[in-house]
Amino acid sequence: MKVRQKRQDGVLLLHLEGNDSLDCSTAAAVRTAVLEQIDGDSDVVLDLSGVQFVDSAGLGVLISVFKATRRSGCKARFAGVRPEVNHIMEVIHLNRILELSPNVASALRDLGGNRS
């Protein structure tokens, strides 16, 4: 799985692509790649629209992104969460902690004006 990044409106956009699973076989590399991109100066949108399956290792990646951004005083939004991944988040109540947006555009809109 590759992590593609770009900046838009001062927000770091991270897109996961190339594999539909964020699981034990991809999580370590994705975690490293994503955390290397988080600079502590920008809010982050992680686009999960291409992820159809996530296991506990993949959920750990999402929590790592959440914690890294919070620690630096920034925010993270998780965009495009597919129903099958959202179901897993609901079962373990992770959807109550992570801020989810239906797509990247709405995540950017939700973050707009949140930074001082």
Image (tube, rainbow, N blue to C red):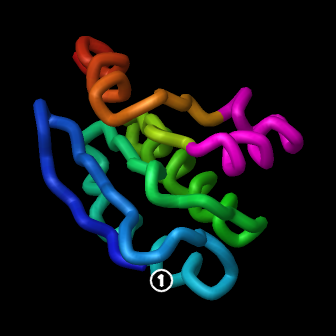
**Would you call the spot at circle 1 few (<14 residues within 10 Å), some (14-19), or many (20 or more)?**
some
Name the chief secondary structure element in magenta. helix
Image position of 49 (left or right of 43): right
Q: How many marks?
A: 1
Q: Which residue is mark 1?
A: 29
Quadrant containing the N terminus is bottom left
Q: Amino acid at mark 1?
A: Ala
- Residue 33: image quadrant is bottom left
Name the residue at the right extreme.
91
Which residue sits at x=45%, y=49%?
49
Q: Is 100 or 37 nearer to us in this picture?
A: 100
Which residue sits at x=33%, y=35%?
104
Which residue sits at x=77%, y=42%?
87
Q: Is residue 74 magenta?
A: no
Q: Magenta segment, which residues?
A: 82-97
Q: Position of residue 107 (x, y in %)?
A: 36, 28
Q: Is 89 or 52 nearer to us in this picture?
A: 52
Q: Position of residue 45 (x, y in %)?
A: 36, 42
Q: Secondary structure at mark 1?
A: helix
Which residue sits at x=53%, y=69%?
20
